Image: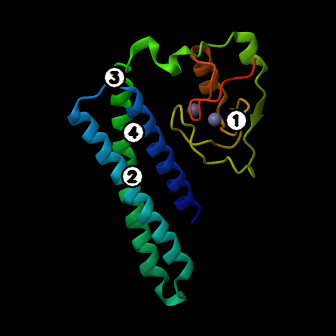
Amino acid sequence: MQQLKLRQQQLSALQELLTSEMAVVEGTPLQVSAVEQAVGLLAQSLRDMRQASRAMLLSKPEDVQAVSAAVSATDLRADEVSRMARQLLGVLRAFPRRGGLRQEQDEVPGASPEAIAEVPTTSCSESSPLLGQTCCICLGAFAEGDALKSIQCVHYHHAACLDEWLRIKACCPLCKAVMPT
Ligand SMILES: [Zn+2]
Ligand SMILES: [Zn+2]
């Protein structure tokens, strides 16, 4: 059950990332349609996951085996879809940015090492709701004991990932909230 929730979070994070990447890159129609297709697959996968979670909650004891087999199959498909989406994301990140340096997002300068050091760090505890959530920078899951950081928004990232990001751009990579100065 927990596994399913994580998978859903991972899929929606990927969906969000792909959509936002696509908005800033210069893509050929073929590339655009590949991304649209991937986003469609992610959305479909998310719907399947939701349905699977519901089926699991409502299942009668005698159906549990059949239902959990179906859930595993759904999760396996979701894993494939997410792997494909990550690859696509990697490809997109290498694309030229639309409008080059005039892009609004690129106007946010990097933060100084002192300012970055002031962003509070927290450790991911065993009971933290962040445990297992996806870092949108490296796409890795938060593990117990990981150092996590967030600027004033609600999004957490690995401390090392965010530090590196903030040096380039002083904003949240997910919601673009600008780091307080
Ligand atoms: Zn990370
Ligand atoms: Zn944010």
Label of residue 95 in the image: 3
Closer to the chain start, of discs 3 and 4, is: 4
Q: Disc 4 to disc 2, how far (Cα)?
A: 11 Å
Q: Vertical placement of 114 versus 19: above or below?
A: above
Ligand 2 neighbours mark 1 (CB distance < 8 Å):
yes
Q: Disc 2 to disc 1, how far (Cα)?
A: 26 Å
Q: Disc 3 to disc 4, how far (Cα)?
A: 15 Å
Q: Disc 1 to disc 3, how far (Cα)?
A: 28 Å
Q: Position of residue 63 (x, y in %)?
A: 47, 86
Closer to the chain start, of discs 2 and 1, is: 2
Image quarter where ligand 1 lies: top right
Amino acid type, callout 4: Arg
Give the residue displayed 75% in from the left and 11% down from the top. Answer: 114
Ligand 1 neighbours mark 3 (CB distance < 8 Å):
no
Ligand 1 neighbours mark 2 (CB distance < 8 Å):
no
The residue where tag 4 is placed is 86
Q: Vertical placement of 46 versus 81: above or below?
A: below
Give the residue displayed 71% in from the left and 17% down from the top. Answer: 116
Q: Disc 1 to disc 4, how far (Cα)?
A: 24 Å
Q: Vertical placement of 173 versus 33: above or below?
A: above
Question: Mark 2: which secondary structure?
Answer: helix
Closer to the chain start, of discs 1 and 3, is: 3
Amino acid type, callout 3: Phe
Which dot, 4 or 2, sits closer to the camera?
2
**Visible residue check, residue 155:** yes
- Say if mark 4 contacts mark 2, CB within 8 Å: no
- Say if mark 1 contacts mark 4, CB within 8 Å: no
Task: Count residues near mark 2 (Cα–Cα under 10 Å), then give few for <14, some for 14-19, many for 20+.
Answer: many
